Image (cartoon, helix red, strand yellow):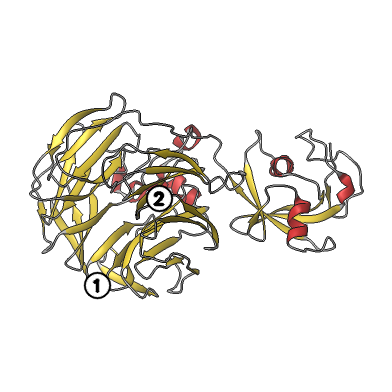
Amino acid sequence: SFGVLARGQRRRDGIGGSASGDLVDESKGRIFAQFCSAEGEVKGPQLEIPLGLTNKQLNSVLNELLGNERTEPYSFFLNDQEICGTVADMVESQSLSTEEVVSIVYQPQATFRVIAVTRCSGTLPGHTAAILCVAFSPDGRSLLTGAGDATLRVWDMLTETPVHTLTGHRNWVLCCAFSPDGGRLAASAGMDQELRIWEPATGRAVGRPLKAHTKWITSLAWEPAHRAEGGECRRVVTASKDGTLRVWDVVQGSPTAALSGHTASVTMVKWSGQGLIYSASEDRTIKVWEPDRGILCRTLEGHAHWVNHIALSTDHVLRNAPPNAKQAELSPLQRYDIARGKGERMVSASDDHTLYLWDPDDGKKPIARMTGHVQPINHVSFSPDGRLIASASFDKSVRIWNGMTGKYLATLRGHVGAVYQVAWSSDSRLLVSASKDSTLKLWDVDTGSKTFGKLRVDLPGHSDEVFALDWSA
């Protein structure tokens, strides 16, 4: 057992924090600590804790401090470095004084663990050309794939069989997505400049093709479920090579807004939980739009070359995919508010080999400029808990960054070709990457693990480049 005291409290062994039952080396001394949430909110009084406390024992202290009915897992950070050993190890490595109060930042971890995939469990043949986009339904039971053969297919993931073939496109299908209101509808678009809406359950098209763009459509995004009227998503935004964005009402079958301002191809679009639309372009800028009024709010500048991709810290919950039963009891708005915390962050990836971390709700200046890649960055993604960022580059590597500060954490090397995409497990502890070298690679990205940044499993099997990737919730 060990003793934890509030500042000014008389020393008495066994006061609080002894839930772990592990012995602590008291000979290392003590230090005053203040627990703070990742958003900067101070929790409880300053405590005098043994320097010999481990991560597991800090969990016991914090759970008792927060009054949790059951033990919840947390990770702990001292000056942005995670405490993996003891507090003493971190104090010594950072040359901190034991006479001063240290601030220990805690972040909740997933209460479940995703079991790492070890092999290919099935092959889904059917398309006659390269598959260019894939998307799981919010419940993970269906898969939507779009290909260069101008078709989409809906697959049943329980039986690994095709359910419907969606025909109608006249050229490559470049992007597809289920609606976040439970996958009631699906949207697809591509080289034929048309947006098409489908009923995945029946395989039927909804209405006529939606046409307005003068060049191919590069990206699309559904309005988040918590912002949709009655909880039923009916608006989609599309981005195009023609430099414009269009907001569509898929029920009326007509555009409700045309957003123009980019001077080159729009490469990526996101619809945020705040109701704003973010678009990235080859004109080196990111623009923030207010779709209801159809106006430009501001332009984010900094990149020196094309902006290839953007991601939001709330992307996982905006898909309306609850990662566990506890969150399934919450509404889409409640889940979003938890994930957003004190701010929805955005990260952008560019051909200039850099990433920028933004707080797009507040101002035009980036939080951080992230450098290290030596070739264009093709794809970027936040972990479901928003703590980490993964970037995939043509330099054959994946880099991991702190999702709050943009600080570099690790480089994942192993691919022998350009890395096209990455995807996270819903517990934020595993990452899978897809590459030109025809393989997938599964990485351990649990920051509290001794094998952080190491290759877990090599997943061969494809006979050519792997262009698209998704991980079910």
Q: Which mark is residue 87?
A: none
**Residue 390, position as x, y percentages in the image:** 45, 54
Image quarter hosting the C terminus: top left
Q: Which residue is mark 2?
A: 415
Q: Position of residue 233 (x, y in %)?
A: 27, 46
Left or right relative to 6: residue 458: left
Using the rendered image of the protein, determine whether residue 87 is visible from the camera's viewpoint: yes
Q: Nearer the viewer, mark 1 or mark 2?
A: 2
> In the structure shown, which secondary structural element does the residue marked by tag 2 occupy?
loop
Identify the residue shown where x is 44% and y is 64%: 373
When the figure is inspected, residue 288 is found, relative to residue 434, above or below; the finding is below
For the N terminus, the image quarter is top right
Q: Amino acid at mark 1?
A: His
On the image, which quarter does residue 237 sit in? bottom left
Q: Nearer the viewer, residue 277 or 58?
A: 58
Let me know if residue 391 appears in the view: no
Three-letter code, disc 2: His
Separation of disc 1 and disc 2 at Cα? 35 Å
Q: Residues within 10 Å of mark 1 (few under 14, many from 20)?
A: many
What is the crowding at mark 2: few (fewer than 14 residues within 10 Å), some, or many (at least 20)? many
Given residues 245 and 168, the one toward you in this image is 168
Q: Residue furthest front?
A: 416
Q: As displayed, is residue 296 above or below residue 256?
A: below
Instruction: Name which residue lies at 50% across and 34% down.
Output: 326
Horizontal and vertical percent position of residue 18: 80, 37
Q: Which mark is residue 262?
A: 1
**Which badge, 1 or 2, comes first in the chain's sequence?**
1
- Camera-side residue: 375 or 226? 375
Q: Are marks 1 and 2 in contact (CB under 8 Å)?
A: no
At mark 1, the secondary structure is: loop
Residue 41 image-quadrant placement: bottom right
Residue plotted at (10% across, 51% down): 171
